[in-house]
Image (cartoon, rainbow, N blue to C red):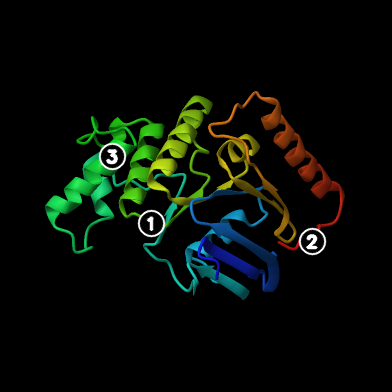
């Protein structure tokens, strides 16, 4: 196996039972993710993006196919891969510091080591002056930064993000996208991001996997080689935006297209 590869998804199919009938939601999904990449899974609601992310994380089983994480078959969730949701998942009775320390408890580290590591990642997300604040005292953007710090403190090889900025206003979403790029560059974490926001996918990603639906399948892969952070108003950005919009137009007017990746 190529040592640069972290995740390999090969010919994955997934069905759910609906009113006594089997409904195929993912069909023949195959792709690889390299270490240090940011890969977005982009698609309309109902195409199976979150189901695919949960299979990669080990929260959901597949029907057939293989999902390898660092060369080993994914059979259950692991601390090597951490999921970050839109609702932050912070405990309201714990401070910022205590929320970040939560993921480090029962790891064999001493209290002093846990405190030191938690503070390091809180500083990384720019909240070192909010250590004693509680979630209710923070904005939505700050709460999401706490959730990112808690995930990074575990030092996972893979960070899985399911619409992490979807509940935020545009300004906070742009700010956190920039912060995520800075953090990812510093921590060298591999990120898989599920989104339905085309601009977000273009701004953050090294590659975009566009999913079609009925059933969910990889319709196209787009590689973005331009510099980061990207100019949202630039011609290259608009070029990729047009490409993606055209793909969605095609997906609504033609049968699903099969791609070998």
Identify the image quadrant of residue 155. Answer: bottom left
Q: Position of residue 194 (x, y in %)?
A: 57, 49
Assess disc 1: are there few (<14), some (14-19) or many (≥20) residues with their C-alpha within 10 Å of its C-alpha. Answer: some
Quarter containing the C terminus = bottom right
Residue 147 visible, this orientation: yes
Along the line of sight, the residue nearer the viewer: 150 or 138: 150
Q: Is residue 126 left or right of residue 32?
A: left
**Residue shown at the point (32%, 38%) measured from the top left:** 124
- The answer to whether 56 is drawn above or below residue 254 in the figure is below
Which residue is denoted by mark 1 in the rendering? 156
Q: Give whichever of discs 3 and 1 has the lower sequence position.
A: 3
Judge left or right: residue 114 versus residue 188.
left
**Circle 2: element type:** loop
Q: At 35% from the left edge and 49% from the top edge, which residue is drawn?
A: 152
Q: CA distance from mark 3 to mark 1?
A: 16 Å
Name the residue beneath numbered marker 2: 258
Q: CA distance from mark 1 to mark 2?
A: 33 Å
Q: Relative to residue 83, is residue 70 depicted above or below?
A: below
Position of the N terminus by quadrant: bottom right
Sequence-first disc among 3 and 2: 3
Q: Which mark is residue 122?
A: 3
Q: Name, please, the residue furthest toward the right.
A: 254
Q: Nearer the viewer, residue 7 or 150?
A: 7
Pick the front one: 237 or 15: 237
Residue 15 image point, x, y percent: 65, 70
């Amino acid at each position: 196996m190529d040592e640069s590869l972290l995740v390999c998804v090969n010919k994955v199919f997934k069905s759910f039972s609906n009113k006594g009938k089997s409904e195929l939601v993912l069909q023949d999904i195959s792709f690889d993710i390299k270490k240090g990449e940011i890969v977005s899974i982009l698609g309309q609601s109902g195409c199976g993006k979150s189901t695919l992310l949960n299979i990669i994380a080990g929260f959901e089983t597949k029907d057939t196919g293989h999902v390898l994480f660092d060369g080993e078959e994914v059979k259950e969730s692991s601390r090597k891969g951490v999921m970050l949701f839109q609702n932050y998942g912070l405990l309201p009775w714990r401070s910022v510091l205590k929320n970040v320390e939560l993921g480090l408890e029962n790891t064999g580290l001493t209290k002093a080591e846990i405190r030191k590591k938690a503070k390091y990642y809180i500083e990384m997300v720019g909240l070192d002056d909010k250590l004693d604040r509680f979630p209710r005292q923070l904005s939505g953007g700050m709460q999401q930064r706490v959730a990112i710090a808690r995930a990074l403190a575990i030092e996972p090889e893979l960070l899985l993000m399911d619409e992490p900025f979807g509940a935020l206003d545009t300004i906070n979403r742009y700010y956190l996208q920039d912060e995520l790029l800075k953090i990812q560059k510093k921590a060298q974490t591999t990120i898989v991001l599920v989104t339905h926001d085309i601009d977000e996918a273009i701004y953050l990603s090294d590659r975009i996997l566009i999913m079609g639906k009925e059933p969910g399948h990889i319709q196209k892969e787009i590689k973005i080689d331009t510099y980061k952070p990207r100019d949202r108003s630039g011609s290259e950005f608009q070029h990729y935006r047009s490409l993606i919009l055209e793909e969605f137009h095609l997906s609504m007017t033609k049968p699903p297209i099969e791609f070998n990746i």
